[in-house]
Image (tube, rainbow, N blue to C red):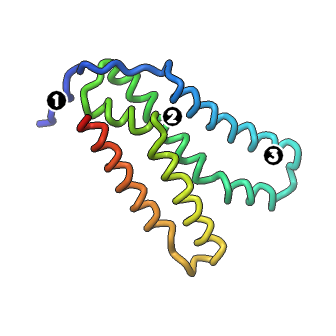
Amino acid sequence: MSAAAPGAGPYDLTLATPGFYLLLATLLLFVVMLVLLRTSYPRRKRGFEGYLDAAGVSLVFLAFSVLLVVSLVLRDPQADRTDYALYETTLTGYWLAFAIPVVTVASSVQARSRGAIRWLLPSIGVVVLVFFAVLAYYYAS
C-alpha cells in the first residue's frame, strides 16, 4: 500500500514572486553567457572549460532550484507546510547563496589539484545539511 499524498494546505504557492524572477533571470544570464561564448569563440576549448569550471556548479544549483519551484507550484498550488518550506527555502535564496560558493570552491580546488584534494563530495554533504537546516527553519515557522 502506498501512502496518500497530503491534502491541500493553507499556503498559496505562485511563480509570480520577485524571488522566482530573480532565480530565473540568474539562470538565463548564465545560459546567455554560455551561448555567447560558444557563438563568439566556437573553437576555444579553454574558454569553454573555464566557463564550466566557474559556472558549472551554479548552473546545476540554479536549474535544480527552478525545476523544484515550478514542480511544487504546478503539483500543489495550495501547499502544506512541507511544500511551503521547500518553496521558501529555495526562493529566499539563503541556501543558494551559501551552497553555490561552497561547492564551487570545493570543485575548483579538487579540479586544480587533479583530485589530490578531495573536497567536492564533503562540500556537497555540508550543503545538504545546510539545506535541511534551512528547510527545518521554514517548516517550524
Residue 64, image x and y in percent? Answer: 49, 41
User: Real-space Cα distance between discs 2 and 3?
Assistant: 24 Å
- Write the residue at 62% across / 37% down: 27
Residue 128, image x, y percentages: 38, 54
Q: Earlier in the sequence, mark 1 or mark 3?
A: 1
Task: Examine the rendered structure and indicate whether residue 11 appears above or below residue 19.
Answer: above
Q: Amino acid at mark 2?
A: Val
Q: Circle 2 sits on which residue?
A: 66
Q: Which mark is residue 4?
A: 1
Quadrant where the N terminus lies? top left
Which residue is at the far front? 141
Please tell me which residue lies in front, 54 or 91.
91
Q: Nearer the viewer, mark 2 or mark 1?
A: 2
Residue 38, numbered label: 3
Q: Secondary structure at mark 3?
A: helix
Quadrant in which residue 25 is drawn: top right
**Secondary structure beneath disc 2?**
helix
Kindly report the distance in space between the C-alpha atoms of the residues bearing marks 2 and 1.
26 Å
Q: Which one is in front, 109 or 18?
A: 18
**Eye-nearest disc, 2 or 3:** 2
Image spot of residue 136 (x, y percent) = 28, 44
Q: Earlier in the sequence, mark 2 or mark 1?
A: 1
Instruction: Name the kind of residue labelled 1 in the image.
Output: Ala
Q: Residue at x 81, y 46 (%)?
A: 37
